[in-house]
Image: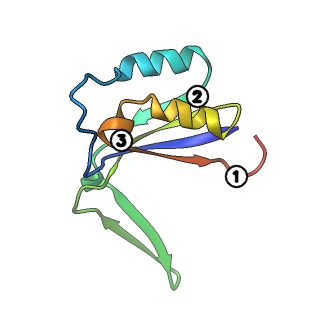
Amino acid sequence: MRFMMFVAEDDHPDTDPAPGPDVDTWVADHDAAGRRLLGEVLEPAAGATTVRVRDGRTLVTTATVSGPILGFDVLECADPHEAVAVAAAHPMARYGRIELRAFAGPD
């Protein structure tokens, strides 16, 4: 199963003082295992462009505030339980939040 994993900020990070996992190690481990197919850090939302079509007109706006999404990863996991385990091991599961969404349709 393929999953989109959104990496986001959170107003209530973990307060455990123990050091968290290293993101470079997380990336290397899941790339090597074939579970991470693609991943990128995104530019801040303040530079994002929103595109909508309303009444036949294209409306383009630029974000003026920062948004919570920092990056994403595309995962290939055996099932949702494995995807949750992969997400839970990501550093931002402690310092931010992770949202998982399965891709619709066949793999």
Which is more N-terminal, label 3 or label 1? Answer: 3
Please name the residue that numbered disc 3 is placed on.
Answer: 42
Instruction: Report the amino acid beneath label 1.
Output: Ala
Name the quadrant of the C terminus: top right
Res. 104 mark: 1
- The x and y percentages for residue 97 are 38, 45
Q: Is residue 61 left or right of residue 17?
A: right
Q: How many marks?
A: 3
Of the two numbered discs 1 and 3 in the rendering, the one whose residue sits closer to the viewer: 1
For the residue carrying disc 1, how many other residues have a C-alpha within 10 Å: few (<14), some (14-19), or many (20+)?
few
Q: Secondary structure at mark 1?
A: loop
Question: Which residue does the image show at 50% across and 16% down from the upper left?
Answer: 29
Q: Is residue 78 left or right of residue 52?
A: right
Which is more N-terminal, label 2 or label 1? Answer: 2
Question: Which residue does the image show at 43% across and 66% down from the upper left?
Answer: 51
Q: Gap between marks 3 and 2, in whole Å?
A: 17 Å
Instruction: Report the amino acid beneath label 3.
Output: Leu
For the residue carrying disc 2, how many other residues have a C-alpha within 10 Å: few (<14), some (14-19), or many (20+)?
some
